[in-house]
Amino acid sequence: MKTSKKLSFPKLENEFLENILRQLVNQYTIAQMFFTKQELSLHSQLVITHEKKIDADQLQSAKWVAKARNIYQINVIFIYSGRLHHRFSMGHPFIELYCQPSALIYQNTATLNPLIITRDWKKYKKKFHAFEERFYNDHDLHKSQVHNLISENSSNSVFTSYARLMEYELEYLEELYAVNTFDSLPLAERINNLTAYIPEIQKYFVKNGHSNYYLIELFAKAKEASVNDGEPIHKNEMYEAVAIAEQNLYRLIEKRLDELKKRIKKGLFDKQDVGCQIDEKPAAIILAVAIETIVKSVEVEQIYFYHQITYGEKTTYYLMLIAIGAGNEKLKSVTQSLKSKTGGKCDFVLISHNRSWIQKNLYQFQSFFTTIIQDKYLIYSSSPYHPVLHWELPHNPYHADLYFYYKPTKDVALQFFTIANNPKGNYQGLDYLFSEFFLSFCRTYIFVKTYYLPNNLTSQALWQLCIYADPDIRKYNYLLEQFWTDCFPYLNKHRVLHHKLSKLNKEKVDQMNVIVEKLMSVLNNLVLEGRLLLPFEQDC
């Protein structure tokens, strides 16, 4: 599968991981990704939440996860969303530290219940202490049981109880370092896994062979003897050695809890100090840059900032201009200028009409314009005296002339399929048909969803308007991202037929074919199942 060229993760500073993450987003129902870069000898943390537990468990065991940790010093941790929210409700310090909004590098907009942490240390402190207390209370119960068995000189039971106590401690270490537990694995394997996070743990268990440990084998023998009513193993002299190993695990947990506590307090206080700079100032600055750029380039009366979408690292700003002489080429030029001034970190969707045109076309498009032309969205006005539009009251929206938009879209799709499925591989002109279909689809889809028919904007702007009209359409974004070249410039280039030989091959045509099929199916369902055409029009 080809990776996305559009979705980027600059915070990672790691091309190997970026390519893998693009594939994950396309192949799995990834909900959120959080990345925390560490300094000095500490590993960075990449937490990826998944909607399905079985996929999260499978991905955690992938070979590239170990490579990311061993070569790039990045711990990649998969956790399914249900567990994430449960751990968060319990005050889990790992979640509190590594899943802060400032660490978010990707969020699936289709996720119904994303994790958003807003509490400060004062509000979280009680949760943290309750989390600690649960560990200490349960640990003390386990420990007292061991001491009782030692006093009874019940050797086998002492070791099996120590094994349960160490299993409990290993589980907490797994939780505190990886927020997942691996209780289905043998104890020796769990210790081996933890050495990746806590190299120090190797000092506390003598190896007996390549992958096993002396104490763990002792526990296994004691368990077998207890189950089978066998002879006691009489290793009382090992009580102190086992107790020392157990105490070291306990100390590692205390150390990790203290470390997490300090870093959470520091991180949350730092976040509180710079919160305004993170959340508010960039948006205000970007909009100020946008206003200045537009006013210098266009004879604009008013600018409305009516929508905003953040996807990964990039934010898209939707602006409507009431202006004179702001045609498609002018909007394209202004958009490119804005992208350049924001370092490519922001996208802008600009639509523009003059006031007179809007007034004359309210009978058809009023539903769209009334959602945008509101005081709360107004960010610029060249005068306080611009006239208010004469809204139609009541206004009954209807899809006037939908037939004349839907029919050409369907026809060009049929033409595309005919050529794309040509067994002789004659694809001449197919790129033109593909581009025409995309243009026709976007305009028709937007019209059906919003009662607004946009001009022939750039292909990217039209697609972004489709996402504004219905965020669910974004699930097909991966098809455009996997296109063999930058899809939107390709679509724009081929809106006019060029008299030259086609350079298309079957692989490229197959990619086009999938996009046309998927989007045409969406439009068919929308128009036909929605009974938006008259009966005689449905046979078109």
Image (spheres, grey):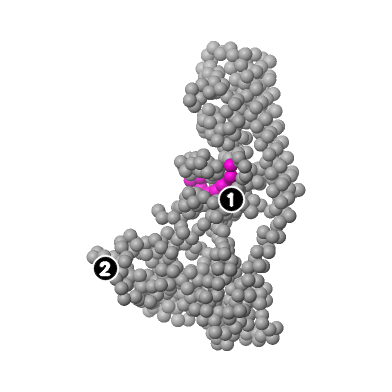
Distance, label 2 to label 1, CA atoms, is: 47 Å
Q: Are marks 2 and 1 in contact (CB under 8 Å)?
A: no
Name the residue tied to disc 1.
34
| SS label for mark 1 | strand
Q: Earlier in the sequence, mark 2 or mark 1?
A: 1
Q: Residue furthest left?
A: 424
Residue 23 at what x, y percent from top left? 46, 52
Residue 482 in sight: yes
Whether residue 247 is situated above or below residue 102 in the rendered picture: above
Report the quarter where the C terminus lies: bottom left
Front-lying residue, 296 or 187: 296
Dot 1, crowdedness within 10 Å: few (<14), some or many (≥20)?
Answer: many
Task: Give amino acid for label 1.
Answer: Phe
Residue 438 at what x, y percent from top left? 42, 71
Name the residue tied to disc 2.
426
Whether residue 291 is situated above or below residue 261 in the rendered picture: below
Q: Toward which corner of the image does residue 432 lie, by quadrant?
A: bottom left
Q: Residue furthest front?
A: 40
Which range of residues does the magenta coloring cover?
43-57
Front-lying residue, 146 or 117: 117
Dot 2, crowdedness within 10 Å: few (<14), some or many (≥20)?
Answer: some
Checking the image for residue 84, the label placed there is none
Task: Give amino acid for label 2.
Answer: Asn
Judge left or right: residue 249 versus residue 423.
right
In magenta stretch: residue 56: yes
Residue 48 at what x, y percent from top left? 55, 48
| SS label for mark 2 | loop
Front-lying residue, 312 or 70: 70
In magenta stretch: residue 479: no
Rendered residue at 62%/31% (across/down): 169
